[in-house]
Amino acid sequence: MKNILIPTDFSENAWNAIEYALQFFSKTACSFYLLHVDKPVVLPDSENYRFANKNSHNETILIPSKQRLQEVISRIKKDFPENQKHRFFAISDSSYIIDSIRKQVLDRKIHLIVMGTKGDSGLKKLPIGSNAGNVITKVKCTTMVVPENARYAPTKQIAFPTDFSIFYQAETLQPLADIVEMNDASVKVLHVNKNGMELNEDQQRNKEYLDDYFANYKHSFEFLTNNYIEEAIQEFVDSREINLITMLAKNLNYFQKILYQPSIKEINYYKNIPFLMLH
């Protein structure tokens, strides 16, 4: 049984992530925890209001968000009525979103966070929203980011961009291995080099480890030369019919260029292809 946390703000982007997760794990027994984090709401002229003024913890009324969560669950059961492997739980909280997600990850033993995101959001025009970006970098849990235009298709080709500078431990790679096995998918380990230099000794050792780790799965190593990592990934995604891009959140060199600083206007993979961020 997998425990999956899906934060939602009741937007269409959030619903798209829910739909994607339900289809992605359609054959897997899962407990889905739908989490909405709201600001504390204290209504005047109520027992709760009077209690809050006397109590430093400020008890809050969260009934509206709980009702909306139940409406989402009702919509799920209406649109996906036949899957008996899935269970749903509504969680309404009033806290900082990162603190709340961290708590749920620990308390519910969450295996995966699934989040929707809208491309080019915020004042800085970041490829992914600030909430998703903060979860990826600040919550130690494998996270799947589902962009606004992503529509579910069977996961058969997975791109794994890496510069081979980091040693991937087995427990870090396990969520990816589970997805590969579940979908009989192929992993395309992608290395983009600006000047065609050969791998150094440490990079070669890390590459060999990945080769050993994926020995029982379909996998290949792809080497491209391009001055722009994000441009190379876009070409790779288009030419290989990639369904999922996976990365290590700790690999800031790749992570920042691919998800935070795309310098090529024609880049759109972050709007169409889900990302699996490993911790």
Image: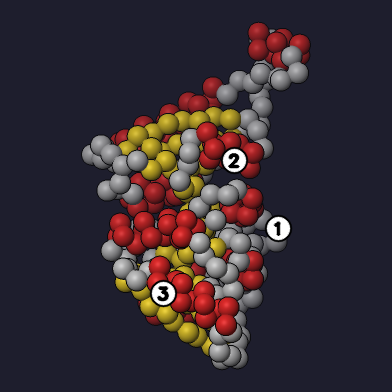
Question: How crowded is the residue under tag 2: few (<14 C-alpha within 10 Å), some, or many (20+)?
Answer: some
Vertically, is 134 above or below 209? above
Which of disc 1 and disc 3 is earlier in sequence?
Answer: 1
Question: How crowded is the residue under tag 3: few (<14 C-alpha within 10 Å), some, or many (20+)?
Answer: some
Residue 263 falls left or right of residue 190: right
Foreground disc of the pair 3, 1: 3
- x then y, percent, for residue 27: 27, 48
Give amino acid for label 1: Leu
Give amino acid for label 2: Arg
Residue at 54% x, 29% y: name it.
92
Question: How crowded is the residue under tag 1: few (<14 C-alpha within 10 Å), some, or many (20+)?
Answer: few
Q: Nearer the viewer, residue 181 or 9?
A: 181
Vertically, is 234 above or below 147? below
Give amino acid for label 3: Asp
**Mark 1, residue position:** 123
- If the image is split into quadrants, where does the C terminus sit? bottom right
Residue at 58% x, 69% y: name it.
166
Which of disc 2 and disc 1 is earlier in sequence?
Answer: 2
Q: Is mark 1 on a helix, strand or loop?
A: loop
**Mark 2, residue position:** 102
Q: Nearer the viewer, residue 200 or 25?
A: 200
Residue extending furthest toward the bottom: 196
Foreground disc of the pair 2, 3: 3
**Mark 3, residue position:** 211
Can the viewer see residue 72 in this picture?
A: yes
In this picture the colour scheme is secondary structure
- x then y, percent, for residue 252: 64, 66
- Which corner quadrant of the image does residue 59 belong to? top right
Q: Alpha-carbon distance for marks 3 and 1?
A: 41 Å
